[in-house]
Image (cartoon, rainbow, N blue to C red):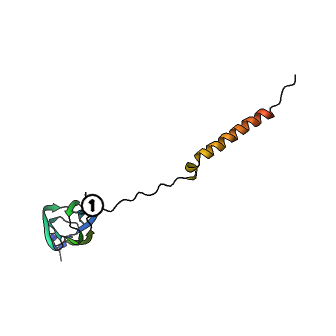
Amino acid sequence: MFLSTVLAQNYGIKIEHVGYGATNNDVVFIISNTGESLVRGITVLIDGKKYETISGTLGPKRAFQEKLYLESGKHFIEVKTLEGAYDSINITTVTEKPKFVEPEKTESFFEKNKIVISSVIFVIILAVFVWLLVRRPRMKL
């Protein structure tokens, strides 16, 4: 009733899209070993066609970054290992990078009215100073 270590091993692989390179056609992925055993011979397929096979092994809970150049359009990216682990992802790329629109800078009430507020504070201080001078008891001669 003992399972051999070969049958009891847990293999898993995962691919995640994490960003872009210099253009939207340079797509960056993270490929992770989600299992508890080493995986070997990771093959990357783009739209069903072999893109590359990465020789070597990837340890459990380890990952690496892979950058793929993809033409504009919808693509189906697959990764599989010699052990049978498999994952896939759909991605759509466009040639032009989206344009970044800078958010409008909103000024606070104090930033908009700092001259008026400063003037009011100055007038209040001046009024208090004058009031103190006027209310001061005068000496009789």
Toward the top, the furthest residue is 141
| Residue 118 location, quadrant | top right
Residue 21: x and y, percent?
25, 58
Which of the 4 image quadrants contains residue 125?
top right
Q: Determine the image quadrant of residue 33.
A: bottom left
The amino acid at mark 1 is: Tyr
Residue 52 position, x and y percent, is 13, 65
- Residue 31: percent from the left, percent from the top? 23, 64
Quadrant that contains the C terminus: top right
Q: Is residue 112 left or right of residue 3?
A: right
Comparing 45 with 127, the one in front is: 127
The answer to whether residue 80 is seen in the rendering is no
Question: Where does the image place residue 83, in percent across and percent down from the top left?
Answer: 15, 71
Residue nearest the viewer, comparing 65 with 55:
65
| Residue, disc 1 | 20
Which element type, helix, strand or loop, lies under badge 1? strand
Query: Does 99 sit left or right of 88 as displayed?
Result: right
Residue at x 62% of width, y 46% of height: 116
